Image (cartoon, rainbow, N blue to C red):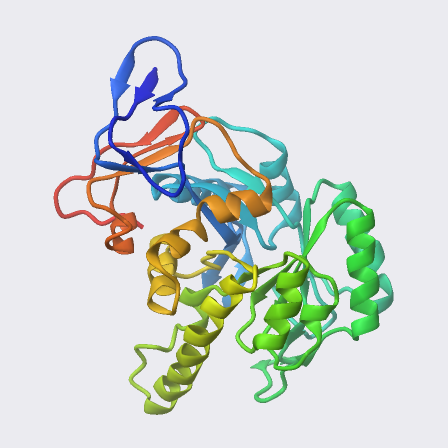
Amino acid sequence: MAWTFSGVFLDGFAGERVVAGTGDSEKLPGRYALAGLVDAHAHPTVAVDERGPYLSDGEYGTARLEEYATAGVTVIRDAGGRSQVTLGFAGTAVAGRPVVTAAGRFLAPANRYFPRMHSPVAPDELAAAIRSEVAAGASWVKIIGDFPEWAEGGPVPQSTAATYDLETLRSAVDAAHAAGARVAVHSNLPDSGLAGIGADSIEHGTALGHSELEALGVRGGAWTPTLCAVLHGRDSADPAVRSRTGELRERLRDCLPYAVARNVRVLAGTDVVGTIADEIALLAEHGLTAAQAIAAAGSSARDFLGIHPEGDIVTYDDDPLADPRALARPVAVVVRGVRVRLRLPAGERSG
């Protein structure tokens, strides 16, 4: 089956109005279209239970990929997970399933990350661990740059600190680049120096300031702020939590447009909470234009990742440029030429 669309193409989508296929052609519903969305910080193999996050299996990951696809996400950058599963996703092209570029395992020392999410990597083992992941098929590696100390009962309050020294991290980044991979670094501390170690993207980055963003922009780096995750307390009943979140929101409203103006690639990523539609809407609420927010999960993200799969199209009845929350209501999704979503029944809301 070939798919045709005769509405308005958004975000610089100047591709064919016919999505390649075989046999007869069928017109897709909707008035507006994008060439699929990108989730640039996803964890398809990470699940959450009453004890917190943990690494799940391939069956869970496959189901998550199907959920991403039906929501209009056709490209995923895995930002850490169960290595043997995510690298398998990245190494196998499946019609109707999002393209995956994977980072493999989480890289952090003992007691500096969620205990069910990683096998500890000592500083003198970091470069070798990176080379091993790349040899297994990772095109990215994910380093936890700072994190609270983890004790038997959970994270120790007020204990967030760097996980590795900067020279170790610079050597690790050099090792990844020499092996042909790029580096994503989890960072939330102010003045940590992590923006200057040569990493390709900073994840979360709640404490990034103008000088760090300038350094990141000079080398064409990216920032994935994961707003659904870092702003999870915005509706809290606790006034103190709302106050802290409000301060962060003001910082973001300053730093996000500043980053775009300094050539930083701002990317949309959901982490393990929220949806890509919510993430784009939050970007638009925190200083980006609707077009910039959509590009963070569209053309800008695809260009940065170097992934431009053919046969992807997502259509909508309402204009996402007028209201990015329209992205939560796709009426048709075609992934690699395979239609994975039909029009929603009245009243149903997509993830």
Q: Residue furthest top?
A: 23
In the figure, 39 relative to 217: above or below?
Answer: above
In the displayed structure image, the side of residue 198 where residue 50 appears, left or right: left
Residue found 87% across the figure and 66% down from its top: 124
Number of numbered discs overlaid on the protein picture: 0
The vertical placement of 259 against 294, above or below, is below
Q: Is residue 199 above or below residue 14?
A: below
- The residue positioned 76% from the left and 73% from the top of the image is 164
Q: Is residue 114 visible?
A: no
Quarter the N terminus occupies? top left
Q: Is residue 291 visible?
A: yes
Q: Position of residue 195 (x, y in %)?
A: 67, 69
Q: Residue at x 75, y 67 (%)?
A: 197
* Residue 165 x %, y %: 79, 75
Q: Identify which residue, 43 or 270, lies in the foreground.
A: 270
Q: Residue farthest to the right?
A: 124
Residue 295, percent from left and from top: 43, 50
Q: Quadrant of residue 339?
A: top left
- Residue 47 versus residue 228: which sits nearer the camera? 228
Image quadrant where residue 236 sits = bottom left
Q: 343 or 318, which is in the foreground?
A: 318
Task: Using residue 61 as the reference point, say whether residue 202 is left or right of it.
Answer: right
Please state the horizontal and vertical placement of residue 90, each as a whole percent of the image.
Answer: 60, 38
**Residue furthest to the left:** 346
- Residue 209 vertical placement versus 312 (above, below): below
